[in-house]
Amino acid sequence: MNYSQTSLCLTLVVLTLTASVSSDVITARCDVEVNSAADVTDQVTGEVFLQQSESGGPTTIVISLSGFDTSDANVLHGFHIHVDGDLSNGCQSTSGHYNPFNVNHGAPTSSVRHVGDLGNIEEDSQGRVETFIIDDVVSLIGEYSVLGRAIVVHAKEDDLGLGGDQGSITTGNAGARLACCVITEI
C-alpha cells in the first residue's frame, strides 16, 4: 500500500468509526497549502478532516500532510486553529489563535487553553504526518464553531504555554506559519 492509499485508509477508518456513533454528523474539510506570504523551506500540503455529531460531543480531527523539511531539527510542529479563515495574504492573514474566552495558551489537555490550541503534530522521517486528534473543546456547531476559521501549521514545537514568557502564553512560541487552510463544511 502506498502513501496516498494509507492516508485515505486512515481518513476513512477514523471518520467511519466516528460516524458509527451517530448517523447525524457534521463533516468539514481543510485543504492545506503552503504559506504564500512567507519564504519557507517546508512545502507542506495535504488535508485535514473534522467531524462531530450534530448533537455535540468530541470532534475528531484527521490530519494527512506531507512536504515537511526533514533536513532541519524540527519534527514537532504547532498545530492551531486561528481566528480568521482569510488567506488573502497567505497564512499571515489568519490572525491569532482562536481564543473566544480570552484565556492563556495551553496544551490540548489543559483546563485553561484557547479553543484553537491543538498542541503539536510530529513529522516522520519522510516529512509526512498521518494522525488524528479527538478534542472536546473544538466544535463544528454552536456559537463557538470553528467552521470558516483557519488551521495553521507552524515551523516549531508548541511549548504548550510552559515557556515562561509572553510568547508562550499567547502562541506557544511555535514560530513561523508554514501552511494553512480554511475549515469548510462538506
Image (cartoon, grey):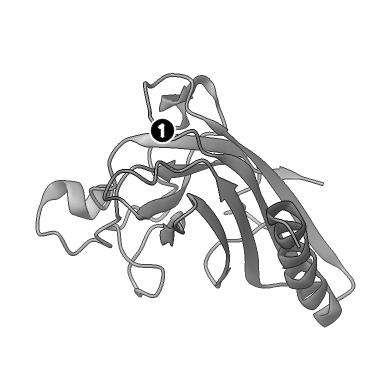
Residue, x 28% and y 62% (percent of image)?
Answer: 160
Q: Is residue 16 left or right of residue 168?
A: right
Q: Is residue 176 left or right of residue 43?
A: left
Number of numbered discs on residues: 1
The x and y percentages for residue 50 are 68, 58
Q: Nearer the viewer, residue 81 or 32?
A: 32
Q: Nearer the viewer, residue 37 or 122?
A: 122
Q: Eyeballing the image, is 126 above or below 111?
A: above
Three-letter amino acid code of the residue under disc 1: Ser
The x and y percentages for residue 100 are 44, 51
The residue that disc 1 covers is 95
Q: Eyeballing the image, is 60 above or below 116?
A: below
Residue, x 65% and y 67% (percent of image)?
Answer: 60
Q: Nearer the viewer, residue 2 or 11?
A: 2
Q: Quadrant of the N terminus?
A: bottom right
Residue, x 27% and y 41% (percent of image)?
Answer: 175
Q: Label 1's element?
A: loop
Q: Residue furthest right?
A: 23
The x and y percentages for residue 186 are 82, 47
Picture quarter containing residue 37? top left
Picture quarter containing residue 31? top right
Q: Eyeballing the image, is 90 above or below 28?
A: above
Label 1 crowd bin: few (<14), some (14–19), many (20+), radius 10 Å: some
Residue, x 48% and y 36% (percent of image)?
Answer: 179
Q: Residue furthest left?
A: 164
Q: Eyeballing the image, is 122 above or below 100?
A: below
